[in-house]
Image (cartoon, rainbow, N blue to C red):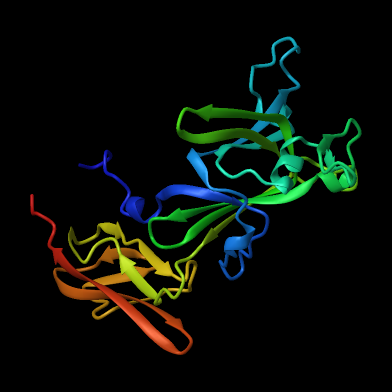
Amino acid sequence: MRFTQIPESTFNELQVNAGVIAKDFDPTTGTLDNADIISATSGGITVNVKPTFEDFGSDIDNCKKNTKELKRKTEMDVNVSATLLNISEDSLKFMLGAADKDATSGAIVARTDLALTDFQTLWFIGDMSNGGYIAIKLIDALSTDGFSLKTNDKGKGNLSVTITAHTSLESQDTEPVEFYIGEPEGQTPFITLNKNSISIVDGDTFTLKAKTYPADETITWDSTDDDVATVDDGVVTAVDAGVCVITATITVDGISYIDSCNVTVKAQAEG
C-alpha cells in the first residue's frame, strides 16, 4: 500500500477510557489529585469545541465564497456534556448555574443574578494509549443547561449536565480553552526511524522520518559511507552502488540514543 496506510503513530496517539472532569490539574507535572475529580460519570464525556466563522465576502458581487482573505473567526463555543453519578451540595450549586445554601434552612436556593464567582476553571483529562494524557482546560466554566436527574427502579440515578466556557471583557481576544498533550510519565528517551532498511537506485532519494521522545529533540544524521549515500535532515541521497548505514542520534542529559537504517544502493539500469 502506498497511500492507504495507517500512520505508524496511530496506536500511540489514541485517547482511551472515559476521562474525568476535575476542578484542578497540573499539566506541567501531569498530576491529578483524586479529591479534585468532580464525580464519577456514566456513558462517557462529550467535549465540543466549535469555532464560528464569518465570510465577509459572501454578499459582495463576483466574490467567491470562502475567500480566505475575507474570512474571520468570530466566536469559539466550548462545552462539555456528561452524566454524573455523585450528588453533593457543591455540585448542585454549580449545576444550577447560580445558587447558594440558605444558612437558616440549609436549602440549596437558585439565584437569578450571576456573580463572577459562579464561573470556575474546570478540566477534562483523558488517558492516551501511550501512557500520556490529553487535558482540556475550560476557562470561566458555567453550567448553562441546568441539570436533568433520571432515576431508575432499584438502580442508580443519572444527572446530566452541560458546562460552557466563557470569555471575559478583560481579555476579549483570549479563547476560553487551552489544550495540553502530556508525555508518558517516566518515559525513557528514544528515537525510532520509520524504516530500518531501504533499497534505492543511485541518483534517487528517500526520506527517513524519525519519532523522538522527548518530542522535537535535535536529531544528528550521519552516513557510514558518503560515497554510497549521503543524508541531510533525513533525506537520503543515493550516490553510487554499495551498502552503508544511516544513523539518527539524539542526546538527552548527556546520553545518546540511536536508531539506524541499512541502505542498499543499486546502479541505474543501463539502456
Picture coordinates of residue 126 (x, y %)? Answer: 50, 52
- Report if residue 165 is visible in the image: no
Residue farthest top in this picture: 61
Q: Nearer the viewer, residue 104 or 31?
A: 104
Q: Is residue 186 left or right of residue 111?
A: left
Residue 68: image quadrant is: top right
Picture coordinates of residue 47 (x, y %)? Answer: 57, 39
- 106 w.r.t. 231: above or below: above
Q: Nearer the viewer, residue 59 or 134?
A: 134
The residue at the point 48 percent across, 65 percent down is 183
Q: Is residue 140 left or right of residue 79?
A: right
The residue at the point 28 percent across, 58 percent down is 206
Q: Nearer the viewer, residue 146 or 29?
A: 146
Q: Is residue 25 left or right of residue 9?
A: right
* Image mark count: 0
Picture coordinates of residue 187 (x, y %)? Answer: 41, 73
Q: Is residue 69 left or right of residue 13?
A: right
- Report if residue 271 is visible in the image: yes
Residue farthest front in this picture: 105
Q: Nearer the viewer, residue 253 or 12?
A: 12
- 203 w.r.t. 190: above or below: above
The residue at the point 38 percent across, 56 percent down is 129
- 245 w.r.t. 197: above or below: below
The quarter of the rendered structure image containing the N terminus is top left
Picture coordinates of residue 156 (x, y %)? Answer: 49, 37
